[in-house]
Image (cartoon, coloured by chain):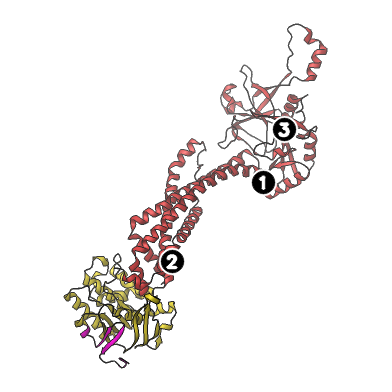
Amino acid sequence: MIELAHVSKIYGKKQNKFTALEGVNLVIDSGRSVAIVGKSGSGKSTLMHIMSGLDRASAGTITIDGQDISLLKKKALDRFRAEKIGFIFQSFFVQANETCLQNVLLPLEIDRSARGERRALALDALEQVELGDKKSAKAKNLSGGQKQRLAIARAIVSKPDIIFADEPTGNLDSATGDKVEQLLFDFNRRLGSTLVIVTHDQDLAKKCEMQVHMKDGKIIKVVGPSKGGRK
Amino acid sequence: MRMLDIARRAGRSLRNAKARTLLTSLAIAVGAFTLTLTLAAGNGINAYVDRLVASNFDPSELIVGRDKEVENTGAPDSSPREYDESVASVSFGGQGSMQLKQVSDSDVEKLESLDYVEQVRPNYQIDARYITREDRERYTLSVQSYNPGQKPELAAGRLSEKDLTAGELILPESYLKLLGFKDAKSAVGKTVDIVTQQPFTEEALRSLLTSGALTQPGAAPEPRRQTTTYKVAAVSKPSVTSLATTGLPVMLSSKDAKQLYDFTTQGTQQYGKYLYAYVRVDGAEDPKVALDAKKKLKAMGFSVVTSQDLQASLQTIVNVLQSLVVVFAIITIIASVFGIVNTMYISVLERTREIGLMKALGMRSGSVAWLFRLEAAWIGFLGGAIGALGAVLLAVLINPLLTKQLNLGEGNVILINDPVQIAGLIVVLIIVAIVAGWLPARKAAKLDPIEALRTE
């Protein structure tokens, strides 16, 4: 479960002060699929960064499965991300010169998974995104949709509790985008991972169980089965 | 992230930038090449010096003199000194002469009476006129007393463990043809004549005056000459590491050598005085024993040079030259360090997004830093290995040539590569490279993942 209480984020100082998030309260139950929607500059990306432990809030508490991650030290936060979070980005961020297998192995190396198990886990993840036959291909030789599927394999390989996807279909045509969406929701249902999608694609947002609408750093509307919602 | 995984990822990212990696490591390779070659040359020359000293100086003999200059293997000090009866003029070929305190016969006796001294062999500088044989021309020669501790290489004949028998000599191979011997074997047991001459002294002049020999018109004083006949005990041949530049000397027994020395110096201030004496000390092959004896002899007022001292003074010259080259090589390596720093900064810039992603996935800053440090380490290793390999290959190629050119003798080489030295050099270069990669690595470690991932 993700619980945010009075979370705010302020960039800069004095005249240059910019409030990216202001008094955000939100509760997301485990296993849900959630879309965070809003125009650019609404603070949806910042909210995702703070929920995923990539960035720190200026104020407020972020409790994930009972643990307040705003209290974690840097190394503990790194480990938290390595063990509990999977990331998918709009521009894929796959390592172009490495093979698909090496890309998927990276999270396993980071969280120090047992050496003997890594390869099997990585191959399994590649199979699940239907890239099993591409395991030795360099990532730079993949198409856009394949790259994003590779990124999904990398995100699910360490069996994270929460997957954050930042505009996962933003750089894809609708056909390949649909395939990627299908995979994401499939994992959300099958593995029970919470799926948080940041998007301004209304169609994609509607496919999620819950929609969080943001504007000017505030949550303006929460649609769906939230216990917390707006306070 | 485990170090092994970090090292493998570092290696992979280098392979993805082959040209850059290779060029950067080539800069280090130049330094490594020079250092390897210098070290190899140092090893070879020092080994050569060892052999040189071993075959020209007997380690169980100490060179013992009365004057401090004996110990001074560098430039002699030519300032005036207090006179006493033991001072005599010693001439240095072409460099004039200098006055030095000398070892006297009584010193020799004193040395011989010491319980740890086995034998004393004064340095007889014998000025022999010529060597000849019946019906043969006369030839110049140099004469030395034979040191049983240091046998010359023989072409024929046999030598006993002790001194030569009086009346025998060792004839250098080069005289065989000149003196009409068919070969070395046939010379053994035959006789040769050595002629020495007494200097024209005051005493000789007085005897000529009193005998009235000079009063006759046209009369010139005849120098006194002595012809001594010796039996050839053995024939020596040059050794490849011999220091002698004038060819091998004729060797006589100590007794004969003393007789000739006394004869040729009679009436001069050199009579009964020696620049130094070779003192054989029991067990002085052991440097500790030699040093101990040196201390005792110095306490008695002697100046002492051991074969270690000689070796050290020869090696000092080698080491000075070697350090010069090493300094240049180190400058090259320092220059290449900037190359590494530059390359690593470019690598960090190029891979900003990759670093951001890895940090987002939970890779620790320390691991990110090591990723780049190990990349630098790989460059250092590669440079060291390329340079060392090049130097080893070159050594293998030119060693036979150098051996021939320098006349080192079969099986002796001047470039000796020591695997431990090379491994040590590569380790040092890896450490240097890691240090060079420190700042770029820190920059990578400090990158904010959000900022890094925003880069499009």
Name the residue type under label 3: Ser
Viewer-nearest residue: B378 or B149: B378
Marks 3 and 2, how far apart at CA: 76 Å
Q: Which residues are magenta?
A: A205-231
* Circle on res. B442: 2
Name the chain letter of the residue that bears numbered label 3.
Answer: B
Q: Looking at the rendering, which quadrant does residue A67 occupy? A: bottom left
Residue with the mark numbered 3: B254
Dot 1 and dot 2 residues touching (CB under 8 Å) = no
Dot 1 and dot 3 residues touching (CB under 8 Å) = no
Q: Name the side, left or right, on which A131 lies relative to B297.
A: left
Residue with the mark numbered 1: B285
Q: Vertical placement of B97 versus A144: above or below?
A: above
Which residue extends farthest left?
Answer: A175
Q: Secondary structure at mark 2?
A: helix
Q: Could you tell which of marks 1 and 3 lies nearer the N-terminus? A: 3
